[in-house]
Image: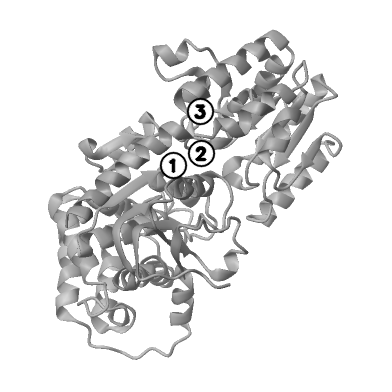
Amino acid sequence: MEHPKAGDADIALLLEGTFPYVSGGVSSWINQIVRAYPQYRFAIVFLGSKRQDYGAFRYPLPDNVVHFEEHFLYEDVQRSTQLQPTQRPGNPQGTALVRDFLAALAAGGPRAPQAMAAFEAVAAQLQPGGAIALEDFLYSRQSWDLLCQIYRDHCADPSFVDFFWTVRIMLQPLWTLARVARALLTVRAVHCASTGYAGFLGGLLAQTRGIPLVLSEHGIYTKERKIDLFKSEWIHDNRNIFQRDPSELSYFRQLWIAFFEWLGRYCYRRADPIIALYEANRLRQIQDGAQAERTMNIPNGIALARFAPLRSQRPASPPPVLCLIGRVVPIKDIKTFIRAMRRVVNQHPQAQGWIAGPQDEDPAYAQECRNLVRSLGLDEQVRFLGMQKVEDLMPQIGLVVLSSISEALPLVLLEGYAAGVPAVSTDVGSCRQLVYGLDAEDQALGASGAVVPIAQPQQLADAALALLGDPAAWQAASAAAVARVERYYTDTLMFDRYRRVYEGALAPAAKG
């Protein structure tokens, strides 16, 4: 496929594992944002793991995307393992910078100003021609000696081989990103949709080119990576039974967590503004190192005109259909929804549970979910619909159900609200705010559904049954949902706020 290329653009969007290859969530929001500002020329830099992990585009590129490039960070790691290494002497200046960074960490901790200054000095030298070359990291004697020293000083895990490869896999993508930063076309501002590797690239561009960096976090990247890392089976823990403390994370998990925390701090250091979707996440950003005066909230918004007409298509009484709209992946906790459906069907035999979303991101998990449906005898009541147009679903369903273990401000709840469909959600992200309201004025609109604890299928089922079994309560929740989304969560409000953000970011370049 031929991608658009340009020599310059107004805004570079740095996207990690989202648009245009992944549908829903952040990708849907990015598609909204780009199309909302036809006056700006966007460049998209997509960062992924390996090319084989992604299929075709899920979204066509808008006309004002004048440049697209993609980089697959772990393909470079794989290629380097296939090369015949040649020992190198290393660069004393680069080694000294790394040692200064480690010394600053030991002396003042990760939040010490001197530690960040040392990290920035290291980051700048990763670029082509810098003092810290990838080949030196991979093959120099100085790098080997430094790795051995860190292992002896800090690693409680007996496997040096696992330590060696963990460090390689973790750090090598930074050199790829440094090359991307050096070669990127001329842009007037940069906008990251997360911290992580995209945030590191954004921070490096802001540091080396002096251009404004805008950061929008839908979820808190470091928090989400921690959840992934706690569950990951690919991270080794070679300590024997006598060495393990159940309350203590393995060294390799600690290493990965610390790495992503540093990438987050680096991005926060350079970004202004730092945008969250809701207040709890803004406070978490400050806790993680963002300067409070740079932070702000801009909630997601949806196009009311797209969903409001669907309200008239609804039947007189709420349909006994519970619909989970989302990817079939562990973080959505589809299994809790399925288990809840067993209890719902026991009390309401006509009820159905629909799962509408792609199943190809984690095929093994999707198969486990199908097996669970079969084992619970729900083949006739629980349906996997795959990707669906949300507009086609809304008139047919009684509740939008969200069983996730982590979310930010889910668009799917707002879409349901605009169509007059209440929600039952786990207590994650901004869902409590969306269901019950943020402040007194918002709360006065009433509850637009119910919020239940994570991974509690019985409570999820009971909340759904209470709404579907009481038409008056359902109607009240529907009215609150419509009122809340119309007052606080329209795309018009969101676009106005981001228009001001972009005008502020581009103003220095325009004056220059």
Asked whether the beta carbons under mark 2 and mark 1 sit within 8 Å of each other, the answer is yes
Between 340 and 76, the residue placed more toward the observer is 76
Task: Tell me if residue 492 comes above or below residue 159 in the rendering.
Answer: above
Q: Position of residue 240 (x, y in %)?
A: 47, 58
Of labels 2 and 1, earlier in sequence is: 1
Task: Tell me if residue 143 comes above or below residue 327 in the rendering.
Answer: below
Which residue in the protein does label 2 denote?
Answer: 406
How crowded is the residue under tag 1: few (<14 C-alpha within 10 Å), some, or many (20+)?
Answer: many
On residue 431, which mark appears? 3
Q: Amino acid at mark 2?
A: Ser
Image quadrant containing the N terminus:
bottom right
Q: Position of residue 271 (x, y in %)?
A: 26, 49
Task: Tell me if residue 400 comes above or below residue 241 in the rendering.
Answer: above
On residue 219, which mark appears? 1
- Res 13 quadrant in image: bottom left
Please tell me which residue is depicted at 78% across the width and 46% down the height of the picture.
Answer: 371
